[in-house]
Image (tube, rainbow, N blue to C red):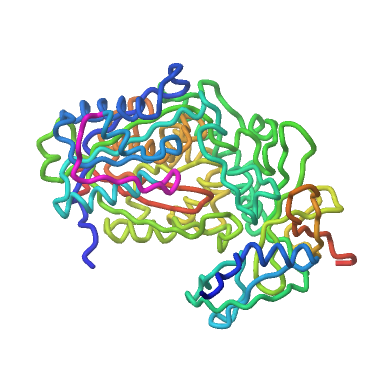
Amino acid sequence: MPSNQDAPLKTYLVHLARGELAYQFSPAAGRAVFYPRMLCPFTGSDRLEWRISKGLGTVYATTVVHPIEGMPFNVALIDCDEGFRLMSRVEDIAPEQVRIGQRVRFRVHQPGGEEPPQPVFVPVEGA
Amino acid sequence: MDGLKRGSAAIVGVAESDLGEVADGMSVIDLMAQGAKRALDDCGLSLKDVDGLFSATTQSRLSVLALAEYLGVNPSFLGSTIVGGSSFEYHVAHAMGAIGLGLCNVAVIAYGSTQRSVGRKQASVREVNPYETPFKPFLPASAYALAASRHIHEFGTTREQLAAVAVAAREWALLNPAAWEKKPLTIEGVLSSRMVSYPFTVRDCCLVTDGGGAIVVTSAERAKSLKKAPAYVLGCGQSVTHASISSMPDLTVTGALTAGKAAYAMAKLGPADIDAVELYDAFTINTILFLEDLGFCKKGEGGAFVSGGRIGPNGSLAVNTNGGGLSYCHPGMYGLFLLIEAVRQLRGECDARQVKNCEVALAQGNGGVLSSQATVILGTQTAL
């Protein structure tokens, strides 16, 4: 009996646990695919290669969430240089200081407990 | 593919159920049934005429079955497409197709929500997206706020311009006795309200109310002999661009562009022909985006377009004439109310908020986080 494929999310999280931001590349489309999935949404091909991002990107959109209780925090969409976008947050600066067009670098956030690691971003120094 | 035939079906009955904060213990199916009865009374039909039944709600897993059982009907055609707030605009197109094929002749499309009474968390199942949920976006507001941040960045749109949308909606609501909000609102009042997800304060966000309603769709031929003037379905169009905001291709361009083009083409009409514009204003940015994507102004100029009272009761374009999701009611999925208001405007039933010589009205349904867009263009006999 052939072995079943790994879940795309599982592979992604295994990389993240190693400190790597993994994404897929579709040779048929010649472009990055994110979030990870079974098929390329541009061509329908099921040939997707896993790649590791260099971890550099640009803030595409940003908001500051103001919870009824607790401190405001950032939620942003980041365009990675390899051509994929993901939701994340920019840390190390005040949430309202995050600006569209800002260059940012990936790092892993370990929430602890049972929660899986998260890809977050920090400003690129001097950018 | 022949597609839908312009004017071959009409909305003939419309009604809201109880709105705002409904009686304790009321279920969403109670509200759907109440709306269905009122909508059928509105056109002089009865439950025995109903052979098509459509519903969508987040609070009943198999709502169309529950509704059929409750009403004691066994329709030959059922529809429960659920794509968020635009579901009902999809239902209109699907009902029109079914009627055209002879699969049913009288379709009721119903909605109900008790989200205010039971709380938002109880009203819809929390769904975990492993690529978004860890970052705790306050959804749906944060998704629309991200879109607003792009609009501000690319086009210089201001918070005051966003606020102008909420102020116009409030001015219309003050002319609508059924509206939830009863007090005037100023731009300063919007800006100084509690911040929710920047750039939105609570006044940039839709209401959280209970409510429901129904509409009745039938063939153009059957429509002629009914109680009130038919609102003919002249054009329909749909577009799905994404489900989650992180997968939306361009946060400043919505599927209303594609949906609107399809609806205009079917209706053989353009933006200049529309007398009343009913847009799904879950957040203030929606109105700006949809006015642009539907061709009422150029991309990027929506902020300036909505300023200076242009879309209010004394403005040059009648937009969200019932007060919208921002000030009239917003029971979770608002799309049905756009159709109800559009039909009432075409019939001339709107008293203080009536748009003069209203012959063509457009309803722009929006679902998810700008995800599913559906346009319905309705017209009177004159426009047919």
Q: Is residue B297 rendered to the left or right of residue A9?
A: left
Magenta stretch: residue B95 in it?
A: no
Q: Which residues are magenta?
A: B71-86
**Which residue is the extreme one toward the top?**
B24
The quadrant of the image that shows the N terminus of chain B is bottom left
**Frontmost residue, B25 versus A86:** B25
**Which residue is the extreme one toward the right?**
A126
Residue B361: x %, y % from top left: 32, 44
Identify the main secondary structure in magenta: loop
- Residue at 16% across / 28% down in the picture? B44
Indicate whether B307 appears above or below B264: above
Residue B173: x %, y % from top left: 46, 28
How many numbered marks does the figure carry?
0
Q: Quadrant of residue A123?
A: bottom right
- Residue at 58% across / 77% down in the picture? A48
- Residue at 23% across / 53% down in the picture? B97
**Frontmost residue, A22 versus B349:** A22
Q: Is residue B245 rendered to the left or right of residue B325?
A: right
Q: Quadrant of residue A108?
A: bottom right
Indicate whether A53 appears above or below B322: below
Q: Is residue B179 rendered to the left or right of residue B17?
A: right
Magenta stretch: residue B85 in it?
A: yes
Indicate whether B156 appears above or below B357: below
**Frontmost residue, B117 versus B312:** B117
Residue B153: x %, y % from top left: 67, 56
Q: Is residue A80 rendered to the left or right of residue B263?
A: right
Q: Quadrant of residue A26?
A: bottom right
Residue B106 shows in the view: yes
